């Protein structure tokens, strides 16, 4: 059935190697990430999951003594080509972090921040963006009457959905998520998972998660990383029910990690 659906690729990664000083963190990574799907990146702590995620929007370049070899192509263009402006990439590729990080501003100004940076000053347009983004993040009904309240006054789960809304306000193509629910309670986690299911209709989502049940619930494909290597990358159901590599099976069965 999968072959009958024409799915476009968003990222093509070929022979990606990365070092922090002399320590190699990624080893010959090769995979293709697909449009309007949720891709889960799983593996034990320190296996390269978050490093890999940060190569996709070049945030890894902010780390000291980092060296990268190989090719990361986004929509057909090599993003590590020095002529490719990082600002253009980050307009298209948004990121949500493990810990909610709202700006110390009002709820409204958190959402309007990105559009204003891109030159949108018209109040009516900004109002529309703020409302639409908060609705997409399933937060509008909870905050519509307190938009000028400080964002830091919200609960942890609300703050994380606010950060997702802030990401959506710039209308990205791809959303990167680095363990977006690891600091949240079960009810907030469920809301974020339901939101991710909704968002994949319009966005390509690549998510690092330590929670294998979460990967099974909401991802279309799963990539298993171990010690900097990509061990297995297939449809999620295949990875969890019929892994082809013994290391994948051992990790899923809880024998290490």
Image (cartoon, rainbow, N blue to C red):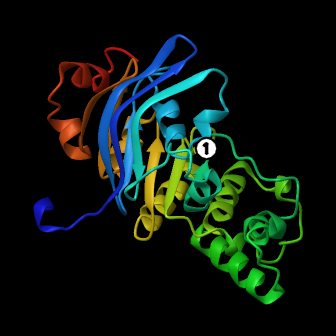
Q: Where is residue 38 in the image (x, y as percent from the top left)?
A: 38, 54
The answer to whether 201 appears left or right of 188 in the picture is: left
Q: Residue 127, located in which quarter of the rendered image? A: bottom right
Q: As displayed, is residue 129 above or below residue 97?
A: below
Dot 1 alpha-carbon crowd within 10 angstroms: few under 14, some 14 to 19, many 20 or more: few
| Residue farthest along the top direction in this orientation | 22
Name the residue located 79 percent from the left edge and 65 percent from the top edge: 113
Q: Which of 73 and 145 lies nearest the eye of the viewer?
A: 73
| Residue farthest along the front direction in this orientation | 83
Number of numbered discs on residues: 1
Secondary structure under tag 1 reads loop
Q: As displayed, is residue 119 above or below residue 207?
A: below
Name the residue located 44 percent from the left edge and 36 percent from the top edge: 211
Q: Position of residue 25 (x, y in %)?
A: 47, 20
Q: As displayed, is residue 155 above or below residue 15?
A: below
The answer to whether 204 appears left or right of 247 in the picture is: right
Q: Where is residue 174 in the image (x, y as percent from the top left)?
A: 49, 58
| Residue farthest along the bottom direction in this orientation | 124
Q: Tell me the quarter of the image containing the C terminus.
A: top left
Name the residue located 47 percent from the left edge and 59 percent from the top edge: 196
The answer to whether 84 appears left or right of 43 in the picture is: right
Name the residue located 67 percent from the left edge and 23 percent from the top edge: 64
Q: Pointer 1: what residue? A: 185
The answer to whether 176 appears left or right of 239 in the picture is: right
Q: As displayed, is residue 121 above or below residue 49?
A: below
Q: Residue 89, located in which quarter of the rendered image? A: bottom right
Q: Tell me the quarter of the image containing the N terminus.
A: bottom left
Q: Which of 5 and 212 lies nearest the eye of the viewer?
A: 5
């Amino acid at each position: 059935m999968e072959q009958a659906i024409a799915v476009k690729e968003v990222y093509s990664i070929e022979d990606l190697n990365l070092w922090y000083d002399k320590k190699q963190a990624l080893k010959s990574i090769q995979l293709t990430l697909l449009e309007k799907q949720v891709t889960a990146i799983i593996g034990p702590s320190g296996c390269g999951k978050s490093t890999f995620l940060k190569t996709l929007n070049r945030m890894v370049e902010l780390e000291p003594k980092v060296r990268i070899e190989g090719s990361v192509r986004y929509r057909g263009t090599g993003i590590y080509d020095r002529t490719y402006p990082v600002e253009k990439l980050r307009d298209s590729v948004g990121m949500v972090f493990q810990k909610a990080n709202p700006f110390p501003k009002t709820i409204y100004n958190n959402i309007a921040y990105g559009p204003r940076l891109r030159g949108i000053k018209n109040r009516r347009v900004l109002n529309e963006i703020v409302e639409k983004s908060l609705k997409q993040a399933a937060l509008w009904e909870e905050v519509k009457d307190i938009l000028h309240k400080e964002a830091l006054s919200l609960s942890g789960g609300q703050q994380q959905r606010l950060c997702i809304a802030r990401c959506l306000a710039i209308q990205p193509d791809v959303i990167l998520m680095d363990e977006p629910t690891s600091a949240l309670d079960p009810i907030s986690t469920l809301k974020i998972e339901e939101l991710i299911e909704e968002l994949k209709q319009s966005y390509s989502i690549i998510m690092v998660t330590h929670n294998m049940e979460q990967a099974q619930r909401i991802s279309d494909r799963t990539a298993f990383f171990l010690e900097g290597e990509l061990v297995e990358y297939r449809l999620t159901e295949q990875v969890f029910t019929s892994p082809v590599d013994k290391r994948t099976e051992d990790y899923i069965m809880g024998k290490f990690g």
